[in-house]
């Protein structure tokens, strides 16, 4: 290597290193700031208390329960629809069909749509037309629509990455396509599909805008009893606290963010464990 | 010598506009090994995959003519492609066992097809039929992917045998294997000849000479010559065949 190219290599490496550490640094600063502001507010009472007008009594219990509800219902709704659509598009639909190509292109477009538009759709379709009101179900379905394209695309990619050889081995045994899909393709694609679901559900749990549009309340002094009840979720509660003039509530918002981050982190860890298990099973 | 159990009549296979197999007529005898040889891209794998409708999965493939299995056209309207593949098994170029245990690899096919069978018995019989039983009988419930390449390929043969097919198609079954594993597969083919009609596509001329009873030589989609392997290798009628076999091209 000439001295010039060696210098260039070194400079390039340093550029990449600076961008990496720069990004990590900003993230660390953010986390530190939130921990500094909110950590002193974190207590068992904060987690189990209902919201209150007085900052020292306010807790995040209803929002936490609301987020769990929303997460579970959204998952139940999007996983079968997402995987089913991906299987149809990749395994059954004619790849030559113009309509199918149009559908695929538009799923990719939908994945990039601003979330507030889904909020408006949810408001019109679920809250008004279907008369679900400002219920957990309406919120979950709205978030479901929002993340469905993400799950479909991730599942499509995971299914497409399964080598044709695997399918042929199944077909050569006289298997029907559904048998090849269920017993050969899906087990091989599960780790990739799982990754998509993790990302999508994390996004749904962290979304604020569409839920504000459909009217998720920020002051809910009771626990939802079923999925037709009113509700609030962590990000909406945090948004509300952050917007108040009193500085105590800003610290409360920081504490809420810590709870939300812990929640997402737990969620991701569980999903990563499931993914690891399936990968090991594969070998 | 018996009548052909499987035969092709005026068979042409097209990929889009280009014709990969051109008006081929050929018969494969029961309980015998037929080798299909020829240079790369001569259409031999395409022909093989036409014999159990594996080309159905490749987009833009069009087939003309007939493939007759026990006097029925497998491309006939009333034919069920899955049924065809149950009777006409296939072993692929690269060993492709399912990422499951050895045991499950064998019973998967019969199970999903609703066959009635004793699983332990079937596993033992199939593995013995593929000369693999002795090596794996103590680890039937280990992953098939832990086996060596040659063992995996014999497992794929055992898996095909488990379906009790009459015909087994082999698409260059040794091309991904080392010489020792190749030898064991060749010996196995010699054993299997007693029970099955085997069609083997191979790049390896010596292999064709060693394992087969009949040989078909393809060039550019045309069947150039077909006859007893001994004759093809010692005294071919066609000068192209002679050139290919003696290594002057291909």
Image (cartoon, grey):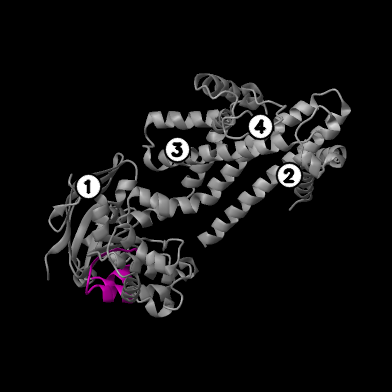
Q: Chain of mark 2?
A: A
The residue drawn where x is 80% and y is 41% is A45
User: Residue A93: percent from the left, percent from the top?
Assistant: 38, 37
Q: Say what secondary structure mark 1 lies in.
A: strand
Q: Say what secondary structure mark 4 lies in.
A: loop
Q: Which residue is mark 3?
A: A85
**B75, A141: nearer the viewer:** A141
Q: Which mark is residue A244?
A: none
Mark 3 vs mark 1: same chain? no
**A239, A93: nearer the viewer:** A239
Q: Are marks 2 and 3 in contact (CB under 8 Å)?
A: no
Q: Are marks 4 and 2 in contact (CB under 8 Å)?
A: no
Badge 4 density bin: few <14, some 14–19, many ≥20, Cα 10 Å: some
Q: Which mark is residue A262?
A: 2
Residue B70 falls in which quadrant of the image?
bottom left
Q: Which residue is mark 4?
A: A207
Q: Which residues are magenta?
A: B187-212
Label 4 vs 2, first from the N-terminus: 4
Q: Are marks 4 and 1 in contact (CB under 8 Å)?
A: no
For discs 3 and 4, the disc positioned in front in the rendered view: 4
């Amino acid at each position: 290597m000439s001295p010039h190219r060696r210098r260039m290599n070194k400079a390039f490496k340093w550029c990449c290193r600076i961008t990496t550490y720069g990004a990590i640094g900003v993230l660390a600063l953010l986390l530190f700031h939130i921990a500094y502001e909110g950590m002193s507010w974190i207590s068992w009472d904060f987690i189990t208390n209902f919201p209150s007008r007085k900052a020292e009594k306010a807790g995040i219990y209803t929002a936490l329960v609301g987020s769990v509800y929303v997460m579970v219902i959204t998952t139940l709704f999007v996983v079968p629809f997402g995987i089913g659509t991906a299987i149809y598009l990749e395994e059954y639909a004619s790849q030559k069909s113009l309509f199918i190509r149009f559908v695929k292109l538009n799923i990719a477009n939908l994945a990039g749509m601003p979330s507030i538009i889904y909020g408006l759709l949810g408001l019109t379709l679920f809250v008004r037309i279907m008369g679900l009101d400002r219920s957990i179900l309406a919120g979950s379905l709205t978030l479901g629509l929002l993340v469905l394209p993400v799950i479909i695309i991730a599942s499509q990619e995971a299914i497409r990455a399964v080598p044709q050889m695997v399918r042929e081995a199944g077909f050569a045994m006289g298997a029907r396509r559904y048998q090849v899909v269920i017993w050969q393709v899906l087990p091989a694609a599960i780790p990739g599909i799982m990754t998509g679901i993790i990302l999508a559900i994390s996004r749904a749990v962290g979304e604020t805008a569409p839920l504000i549009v459909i009217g998720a309340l920020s002051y809910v002094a009771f626990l939802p009893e079923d999925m037709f009840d009113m509700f609030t979720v962590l990000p909406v509660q945090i948004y509300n606290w952050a917007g108040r003039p009193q500085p105590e509530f800003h610290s409360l918002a920081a504490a809420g963010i810590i709870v939300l981050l812990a929640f997402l982190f737990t969620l991701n860890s569980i999903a990563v464990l499931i993914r690891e298990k399936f990968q090991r099973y594969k070998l | 010598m018996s009548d052909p159990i499987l035969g092709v009549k005026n068979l042409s296979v097209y990929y889009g506009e280009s014709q990969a197999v051109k008006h081929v007529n050929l018969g494969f005898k029961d309980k015998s090994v037929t080798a299909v040889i020829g240079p790369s891209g001569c259409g031999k794998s395409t022909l093989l995959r036409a014999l159990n409708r594996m080309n159905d999965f490749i987009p833009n493939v069009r087939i003309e003519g007939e493939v007759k299995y026990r006097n029925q056209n497998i491309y006939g309207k009333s034919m069920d492609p899955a049924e065809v593949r149950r009777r006409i098994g296939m072993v692929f170029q690269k060993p492709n066992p399912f990422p499951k245990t050895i045991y499950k690899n064998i019973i998967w096919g019969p199970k999903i097809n609703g066959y009635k069978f004793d699983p332990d018995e079937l596993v033992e019989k199939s593995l013995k039929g593929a000369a693999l039983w002795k090596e794996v009988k103590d680890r039937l419930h280990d992953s098939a992917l832990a086996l060596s390449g040659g063992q995996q390929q014999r497992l794929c043969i055992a898996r095909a045998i488990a379906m009790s097919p009459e015909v087994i198609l082999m698409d260059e079954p040794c091309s991904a294997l080392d010489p020792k594993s190749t030898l064991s597969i060749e010996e196995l083919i010699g054993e299997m000849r007693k029970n099955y009609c085997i069609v083997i596509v191979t790049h390896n001329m010596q292999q064709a000479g060693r394992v087969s009873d009949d040989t078909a030589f393809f060039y550019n989609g045309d069947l150039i010559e077909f006859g007893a392997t001994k004759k093809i290798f010692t005294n071919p009628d066609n000068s192209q065949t002679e050139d290919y076999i003696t290594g002057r091209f291909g």
